[in-house]
Amino acid sequence: MSEGGAAGRPYPGTRAFETSERHLFFGRDEISLRVADLWRTHRVTILYGPPGVGKTSLVNAGAIPIIADRNIEHFPAGRALPTRVFPAAALPEHNSHVLSLLWSWDPAGDPLALSRLTISEFLARHRRAQPSRSPLLLCLDQAEDLYRGSPAPRAGRMPLLGQLLQALEADPQVNLLVSVQDDRLADLLRDMGLDRRHDVASQHLPALGRAAAVEAVRRPLKGTRLSLSPGTAEALVDELLSGWVTDDLGRRRPVRESTVHPLHLQAVCAWLWQHLPGDLTSVTVQDAHRIGSVDLWLATAAVGSAVRGVADYLNMDAGRLCGWIQDTFVTPEGARRPVGEGPQATAGMPNNVLRTLHDHRLLKAETRSGSRWFELPNDRVVPPLRLAVELLAAPSAGQHAPAPADRLRAATNALADGEPDLASWHARQVLRQGPGRSLRAQAEAETLLGDISYSRDEVSLATDHYLRGASLLEALRDTAAAGALLAAVGRLHLLTGDTATAVVMLRSAVSRLPGNSSVAGELMRALSAPGRTNARTARSPAAENTRTRPQGGG
C-alpha cells in the first residue's frame, strides 16, 4: 500500500501530522478555520488542550494550510526545544530557547548568526529582505517545553517570552499563535504577563466527537486501494468510545467516553493499515477483528509503545514500569486514581518518571492548590493498560533496541530536562551500535558528548568528541557540519589561551565555511590575540587528520 502520507501511510500513528499531510487531516475543519481566523485577527492567540489531543497537528495540517491558502506570510511552527544538533562550543553566549525558536522559523539559517540575534532583530532582518510590511504570523508550538526540568529554569524561558512581547510591540503587523498543554496554561499566561494591550484570544482544543472521529477514520483512505465497508468506521469509533474493565476480583463493568482521544484513534488506524492483509480492498468489522481487538491495538500501538518509549528513555524495564503505572493509577475496582506529585519521588518512583510519562502522553496533569496531580487520560485507557501489563511481562516481549535517531532525541530531551548523565548515556548507546549503523548519528552523538563535556568545563574531553565528530562528517563529505565542529574546537582553544592551535583550527573551519562571517570573526579575534607568536606557523595534527581519526569511542 503506497498511497497516503509519509511512508505511504494515510494515518500518522502517534506522531503529529505534518503540513504536507493536510489532505489526510479530517475531523477538525471548523476549529482549524476558527484558529486560523483568531491567529489572523488577534495579536496573541493561545491554543490549549490536554496532551495528545492534536494541538501540533491542528497547527501544522489545519491552521497553517488555511493561512497559506490566503497568501498570508507566516513562518513554520517553531519550537523552543532544540530539535537539531549543533556544537554548543561554537556558539557565543546565547539563550538556547531563543536560538531553537529562530532556527525552527528559519531552518536554512546559520545557527552561528542566529545565536547573535534577538527575536526583534531577527524579524527586522527578515522585514528588510521583505519590505512589503504585510501581516506576518508567528507560532510557538508546544510552549510546555519551556517548563521542562525540575525545577524548570526561569532564566531560560523568561527572556524568550519577554522577547516575543517586545517583537509584537515593535511590529504591529506581527501576530503570535502559542500552543500549550492545558496544565501549563496558567503558568504561561502568568509568565507572559498578558493584558488587554496585547489583544489576546484563546481556543480550547477538545478531543474528537463521534462524527468527527468517524470522518478521521474514513476519509484519509480516499485515493488509496483500501476502503471501509458501510458501518466499519462507526463500529471502530464506538469501540474506541466504550469498553469493559475487569476489577481485581474478576468483575466486569462497562466504561464509556463521550469523546475519542485523537492519539488513540490514529494509533489504532495506523496499526490496522500496517497489519491488514494486502489483498483486501474493502474492510469489514469482521476483517479487522480477525487480527485483534481495539483493546489489543491500543495496548500495542498506543499504551505499550509509549511505555517502551519511557522505559528506553529512563533505562528501565518496560514490564516493571507498566505494572507500576497500573498499580499506581488504577484502583482495585478498575477506576482511574489521581496521584499527587511528591517532593522528589511519587509512589516509590523518582518524579522524572511521572514527568516522562506525561511527556509521552500516558498521563495528564493538573495543578491543584499549588501541587501537580497526574492521572490517566480517560477511563477507556484502563482496559488496554491492563492488557499491556500482560504483554510487556511476557517472555515473548523480548528486548527493544531504539533506533539511533530515537536515542539522539532522547539525549537532546535529557539535556533540556537538566539530566546530562542520562543524555550522555543515550549518546554513548548510539556509539556502541557501531559506525556501520549511521555515520551521521555517530557524529551527532559525538557532538552531544562534546556539548556535555563543554558544559562541565572538561575542555580536553569536549575537544576529543568534537574532533571525532568532525572526522565522521568529513567521511560523509559534509564539510559545513565538520567546519562547525572545528570552529567549536578552535573557540575552546582560544578560550583556554592556546591561540596558536585556535588559529589552526579556525582556519580549517573557515576553509570549510567560506563566507561565514561568524567563524571569520573568531579567526580574526584569534589572530589579534596577545601571545600569538607561533600562530601562523603552528600545525595541529588533529586538524590535519580529521579524515583519519578513529570513528568511534566515547
Image (cartoon, rainbow, N blue to C red):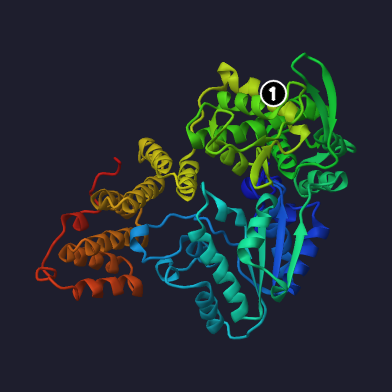
Task: Return the residue nearer the eye: 386 or 444.
Answer: 386
Confirm whether residue 130 shows in the render: yes
Count of marks overlaid on the render: 1
Q: Which residue is mark 1?
A: 387
Confirm whether residue 107 shows in the render: no
Quadrant in the rendering for residue 424: top left
Q: Residue furthest front?
A: 369
Q: Tell whether 418 sits left or right of 144.
A: left
Point 71% across, 43% down: residue: 263
Q: Residue furthest right?
A: 230
Q: Secondary structure at mark 1?
A: helix
Q: Which percent across, then down, holds residue 144? A: 61, 53
Residue 346 vs 142, above or below: the answer is above
Q: Quadrant of the N terminus?
A: top right
Point 50% across, 29% down: residue: 316
Q: Which percent across, then down, holds residue 103? A: 50, 64
Q: Tell whether 305 sits left or right of 376.
A: left
Point 47% across, 68% down: residue: 109
Task: Return the residue nearer the eye: 547 or 173.
Answer: 173
Label 1 neighbour load within 10 Å: few <14, some 14-19, many 20+: some
Question: Three-letter amino acid code at disc 1?
Answer: Leu
Q: Quadrant of the C terminus?
A: top left
